[in-house]
Amino acid sequence: MPSVMGLLEERERAARQRVEVLQVELREAEAAWERFVIARQTVAEVLAGTAAGKEAPSAGVSGERPARVVGAAPGSVVPVWREGLDSGALAPDYQRLVEVLAESGEEMDCRRLAAAVGLEVVTAKVEGVRSKAKRLAARGWLAEERPGVFSLRAGRAGGS
């Protein structure tokens, strides 16, 4: 009859092996996901450049890993703002935050932003808005002059 410790060690070993297999699968899935994100961004840039009558921008990749967007469509990202890029490049939740700030023309805290986009002003919703606004600020779309208070960064157009 096997010992209890022997059985536990056997199950631990099996669980560790399963975790290792899942980690490999996760790395492969993330790599595939990043390739699709980069491809979509490149196509969007080319189409935006072509539609504006400009020369299509190069499809170079900055090496920066796309930011994951919580609560938006799977695979959506927040691109780094650059000249000529409008809020149409953002997922709908992010577009709305930029548009609300552009329309108001003033800085807002996350509670006011949540209310302005039509969300219930409860902690979970406010924190979701805070997370999105901070990501937009980190990517150059918004300015965060004081902690938790956001405005449209000077020179940014909010419209699509």
Image (cartoon, helix red, strand yellow):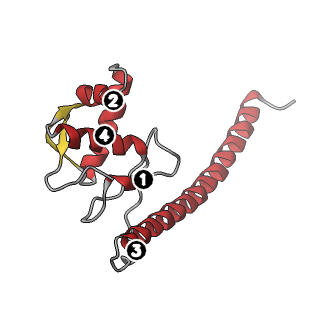
- Whole-Å distance between the Cαs marked 4 and 3? 27 Å
Q: Secondary structure at mark 2?
A: helix
Q: Quick one: 80 or 86, which is closer to the camera?
A: 86
Q: Residues within 10 Å of mark 3 (few under 14, many from 20)?
A: few
Query: Which residue, given by chain and number where applicable, does mark 1 sit on?
Result: 77
Three-letter code, disc 3: Thr
Image side of residue 27 versus residue 106, left or right: right
Please name the amino acid that badge 4 sits on. Leu
- Lower sequence index among marks 4 and 1: 1
Q: Which SS class for mark 3? A: helix
**Dot 4 crowding, Cα within 10 Å, few <14, some 14–19, many 20+:** many
**How far, Cα to Cα, is label 3 from label 2?**
38 Å
Circle 1 packing at 10 Å, graded few (<14), some (14-19), many (20+), is many
Kind of residue at disc 2: Glu
The alpha-carbon separation of the residues under discs 4 and 2 comes to 14 Å
- Distance of mark 1 from mark 2, alpha carbons? 19 Å
Disc number for residue 107: none
68 with respect to 136 (left or right)? right
Helix, strand, or loop for circle 4?
helix
Task: Please identify the quadrant where the N terminus is shown.
Answer: top right
C-alpha distance separating marks 4 and 1: 15 Å
User: Which of the two discs, 3 and 2, sits closer to the camera?
Assistant: 3
- Name which of mark 4 and mark 3 comes first in the sequence: 3
Mark 1 or mark 2, which has the lower sequence index? Answer: 1
Residue 24: x %, y % from top left: 62, 56
Instruction: Using the image, tell me which numbered label, if any, was put on residue 127.
Output: 2
- Judging by the rendered image, the residue that carries numbered circle 4 is 97
Foreground: disc 3 or disc 1: 3
